[in-house]
Amino acid sequence: MQQRAIERKRNPNGEEHRNAAKKVKKALRNARRKWYREVLNQTEEAQSRGDYKTVYANIKKVSKKKINKPGIGIKDPSGNMIYEKKEMAELLCRVV
């Protein structure tokens, strides 16, 4: 820990780096806000036209909720779902 503190004092570029990082974060934040505004305007225009396909597509694009589907699965004899290909192959070999 002391070594890092000494390096920070010796390195005058640390302050420049922090300032550059702040500028980048601010630019990203502004870009994200601009993108959200554009999507919102597109959604409002589509809604006024009655184009609900675009409205729902934009809502899906903006929403953060992701649905994780594990894929295609089968039930084993005890009723548990199996999603792993290897386990499905073993089960199918036992059944057939």
Image: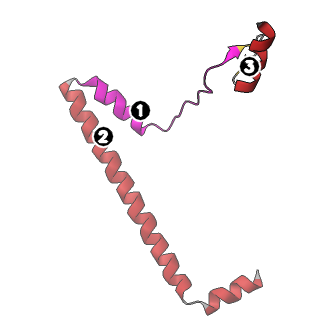
Residue at x 71%, y 82% (from the top left corner): 4
Q: Which residue is mark 3?
A: 89
Q: Label 3 amino acid? A: Ala
Q: Is residue 84 left or right of residue 52?
A: right
Tell me the SS state at disc 3. Answer: helix
Tell me the SS state at disc 1. Answer: helix
Q: Which residue is mark 1?
A: 60
Q: Nearer the viewer, mark 3 or mark 1?
A: 3
Residue at x 29%, y 29% (from the top left corner): 54
Residue 34 in sight from this viewpoint = yes
Give the mark, 3 or 2, whose residue is nearer the N terminus: 2
Dividing the picture into quarters, in which one does residue 61 lie? top left
Q: Label 2 amino acid? A: Leu
Tell which of 42 and 94 is nearer to you: 94
Q: Which residue is mark 2?
A: 40
- Packing grade of label 2 (10 A; few <14, some 14-19, many >=20) is some
- Packing grade of label 1 (10 A; few <14, some 14-19, many >=20) is few
Dividing the picture into quarters, in which one does residue 31 lie? bottom left
